[in-house]
Image (cartoon, helix red, strand yellow):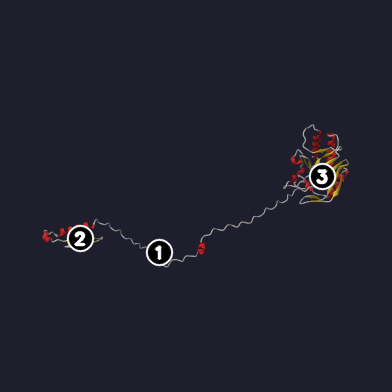
Amino acid sequence: MTGWINISGGGSVRLTAVRVGILMPAVPAAVLGFTLACSIAHAAGPPLPNSRPVVIDLAPVTDQDQPSDEEQLPEEDQVGTEQPEKPVLEKQAEQKLPEPRPVLPAPVAPEPPAPVRQAKPAFDLAKAKQCERELRKLNAKFTVTGPITGDGQCGWPRAVKLTSLARNVKIKGDIRVRCELALALARWSKEVMVPSAKLHLGKAPKAVRIDTSYQCRRRNNAKTGKLSEHAFANGVDVMGFVFPDDQIFNVAVRSGSANAERAFQAAVRGGSCAYFTTVLGPMTNASHADHFHFDLAVRRGGYRLCQ
């Protein structure tokens, strides 16, 4: 007789019963049970490991631990929760845009440099008239002109047009200067220029060549910087001298200590420092290589520049 016994774990054992009484002697029941048990164990295979105990967390569930509605179901299971796709313009509006660049101020054109204010001779009408009286005593010839006007600080309130420094020493050139400068020229001519010419050349000049007197410009004709004393009718450029035989003596760079013309020019330049506050000439720089510059510039402490 044959039959099947189901075994926990998913297996089954086939049993075959025989007629014990016919084929073999009687078998005790204990032996038969043992044999049956061994057959079942052999058919079921090795024993399975004990299953792990199930641990149940009885801690209360809080709102923080509770999954949100969107997390409870996978995306594919969340039927009816999808949001309609937003328009493209709305998506672009939600994107983070770069911060706008700061607005820079418009460039401002640089202001022109402020005019340089500098010390200039002070005008005193009473002193000017006194100067004119002293100039006449030296037999200088001149006429009083009206004020010289110019841009900015240029000009002078009362000038004189000088035509001669003495009876026998004329002026070659159109000269308009302040009276104080004309008086210094007349004294220099009488006390330095004429005696030096007689000493070194044996003759006195009959005229002095002056190229520039008043001129509204900066020093050395520069575009920037301080105004020249010419701008205040306070400077002259002496180019040379004319002698009775019409011989012209030009101011120039001269060499040779024994040369009479060089000695005369050096004497004129050296003696000029006692009458003018500024004396420049051929030994100063290239700008004055062909003339003497004399002026009465106002400086602190009565400082003089003699080069």
| SS under mark 3 | helix
Q: How many marks?
A: 3
Tell me the amino acid under the disc marked 3.
Leu
Inter-mark Cα distance, 3 to 2: 151 Å
Specify whether 30 is left or right of 123: left
Report which residue position mark 3 lands on: 181
Q: Classify the position of the N terminus by image quarter.
A: bottom left
Tell me the amino acid under the disc marked 1.
Glu
Report which residue position mark 1 lands on: 76
Specify whether 292 is left or right of 6: right
Q: Where residue 170 appears, x then y in whole percent?
A: 86, 42
Corner quadrant of residue 25: bottom left
Report which residue position mark 2 lands on: 14
Q: Where residue 68 appears, x then y in whole percent?
A: 42, 64
Choose the circle earlier in sequence order: 3 or 2.
2
Q: Give the class, few, some or many, for how many residues have Cα within 10 Å of label 1's Cα (few <14, many ≥20).
A: few
Query: Which residue corresponds to the image point at 13% horizontal and 60% vertical from the top-left?
Result: 20
Query: Which residue corresponds to the image point at 20% horizontal and 62% vertical from the top-left?
Result: 4
Picture disc at residue 275: none
